[in-house]
Amino acid sequence: MNKINLQFDNRSAALGTKHKKETVIAPLFAKELNIKIKVPQNLDTDNFGTFTLDKKRPGNQKETVLLKARTAMKMLNLDIGIASEGVFGPHPAVPFGVVNTEIVVFIDNNLNLEIFGGHTEKVNYAQSITAFNLDEVLEFANRINFPKQAIVIKSSEKKYSDMVKGLVNKEELITTASIYLKKYKSIWLETDFRAHVNQSRMKNIELATKNLIENIKRQCPNCYSPGFYRIDPKLGLPCQQCGRPTSCILYDVYECSKCQYTADIIYPNKDQVADPRYCDYCNP
Ligand SMILES: [Zn+2]
Ligand SMILES: [Zn+2]
């Protein structure tokens, strides 16, 4: 067993979740680092903010995920804590596109570590609709891959008081929508983003956890601590044909989460030149 695995072998970690994230996170930590995941019974992570906005986040994504992990550690009196947090935001390149970014944090009070992992993925389902009748409700359900993807119903977009979350049953959807339509004339439907009723988010949390474990296992060449991770790709790999810089990666920058030592890894994808089809000059 290598040195990094030895530091975590057979230890227990507190996972701050109430939305069944342990189903994807626990097997990965067990297999890769032999860390046992424990979930505190009465941690209501909704207090750290909800996607339906009836509860606001206490801080940004990183502050919130750290707070969740630390709260779980305190509740179980463990010195390792893990938590994840997801956000949805505008796609950097696609107009009206949406991306889901999941981050997962690993805290170890014994070794004084705070290591992050993450995954970002384009969201390819519709998110919300105002419906005036049952046909529109069912059409929306079809489009978002219901019941694999749960639905939230409320009276209107900005009203947070009267809502039903986690609808995953067609009859229940029809009954609830009918009651709300009678009461409000038009109703607001949105996809439920909570992990246990959203398969695409669960997949992204799993990929973020894999990224986190890779980061934990990568040792810093300066202080030998776990948690040497990629912070920044630098673009500009030269075009094979004309030698001009392209948008392909020239080198990656890695940073130690503990001593802040950084190193550039040149040609991370092995190639020293880029295919001319990635060149703005040769292939505009
Ligand atoms: Zn270091
Ligand atoms: Zn070129």
Image (cartoon, rainbow, N blue to C red):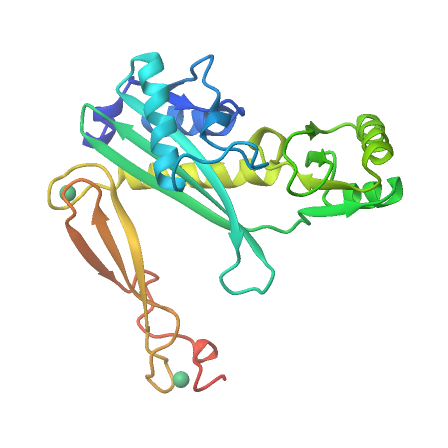
Instruction: Give the x, y percent position of residue 154.
Output: 71, 35
Quadrant into which the N terminus falls? top left
At 39% across and 42% down in the image, what residue appears? 60
Quadrant position of residue 28? top left
The residue located at (42%, 15%) in the rendering is 40
For the residue pair 180 and 236, the one nearer the viewer reads as 180
From the viewer's perspective, tell me whether residue 246 is left or right of residue 202.
left
The image shows a total of numbered marks equal to 0
Return the residue nearer the eye: 135 or 258.
135
- Determine the residue positioned at 28% across, 29% down: 107
> Which residue occupies 59% across, 50% down?
123
> Horizontal placement of 270 versus 25: left or right?
left
Q: Is residue 80 above or below residue 92?
A: above
Give the x, y percent position of residue 172.
80, 26
Q: Quadrant of residue 83?
A: top left
Q: Splitting the image into four quadrants, where does ligand 2 fall?
A: bottom left
- Where residue 37 sits in the image (x, y, percent)? 39, 19
Q: Is residue 13 above or below residue 83?
A: above
Residue extending farthest to the left is 222
The residue lying toward the viewer, choosing from 76 and 181, is 181
Does any portion of residue 8 appear in the rendered image? yes
Q: Nearer the viewer, residue 142 or 283?
A: 142
Residue 34 appears anywhere in the view: no
